[in-house]
Amino acid sequence: AQTVTQSQPEMSVQEAETVTLSCTYDTSESDYYLFWYKQPPSRQMILVIRQEAYKQQNATENRFSVNFQKAAKSFSLKISDSQLGDAAMYFCAYRSAWGGGGADGLTFGKGTHLIIQP
Amino acid sequence: GAGVSQSPSNKVTEKGKDVELRCDPISGHTALYWYRQSLGQGLEFLIYFQGNSAPDKSGLPSDRFSAERTGGSVSTLTIQRTQQEDSAVYLCASSPVGGTQYFGPGTRLTVL
């Protein structure tokens, strides 16, 4: 079974600064997907960024980018120019690429609570 | 277009009662997922539907939990004889086959 570990229960950053959230995972599969989701107090899980394991290039979405290290099984999220609206719980998630049955379900980490200091 | 919707937004029930939670996926999404989010267990995957079929029900916490999907669209998660440990936020997500999952706002269930 796959596991996802987020070692930082809480992180704090000054507005406009850069912050990196850590995520490591354990799997014996070679092909999979990794995700970062954001969950503000409204409870709505919002996709931030997605990475396919077969792609060596790190995914980016505007101020959000990842550092994907496949050999180290590490998938960190960098948020540049932090904004007050970035305050939320951030979840790292894994999904097998093979699909079918429970393999399609996401395996989540415990989350990191990101606080933005004005 | 419309996102995933869930109803009710909040549900308070008494221990021992049955509850039904509803999920309306994004139109055209053939895959539908249920997750449970609780303080103690974090986010747990419960069940996955491809069309109306649920190939793997092993994620359901107990036989008090069941789910169905009709017409390849709406899904209902039913919890019978609710217990206090069932209190959690129940999240639904949908996706195209093999695609990214998009989540609904969740149903907060409180069992008194």
Image: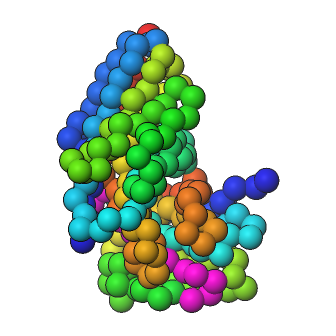
> Is the C terminus of chain B in the top left, top right, bottom left or bottom right quadrant?
bottom left
Closest to the observer, B16 or A23 = A23
Magenta region includes residue A1 = no
The answer to if B48 sits in the magenta stretch is yes
Asked if residue A19 is positioned above or below residue B15 in the image, the reply reads: above
Q: Residue at x 46, y 75 (%)?
A: A99
Q: At which x and y percent is residue B83?
A: 33, 74
Identify the image's colour scheme: rainbow, by chain, secondary structure or one colour: rainbow
Tell me where residue B87 appears, x and y as whole percent.
37, 63
Residue A4 sits in quarter = bottom left
Does any portion of residue A97 appear in the rendered image?
Answer: yes
Residue beneath the point at 37% across and 80% down: B60
For residue A105, say whether it is visible. no
The residue under the point 32% across, 34% down is A21
Q: Which residues are magenta?
A: B40-53
Kindly indicate the quadrant of the structure image that contains residue B74: bottom right
Assign the magenta stretch its main secondary structure.
strand
Choose between B74 and A80: the one closer to the eye. A80
Q: Is residue A68 above or below residue B110?
A: above
**Would you place residue B14 above or below residue A79 in this image?**
below
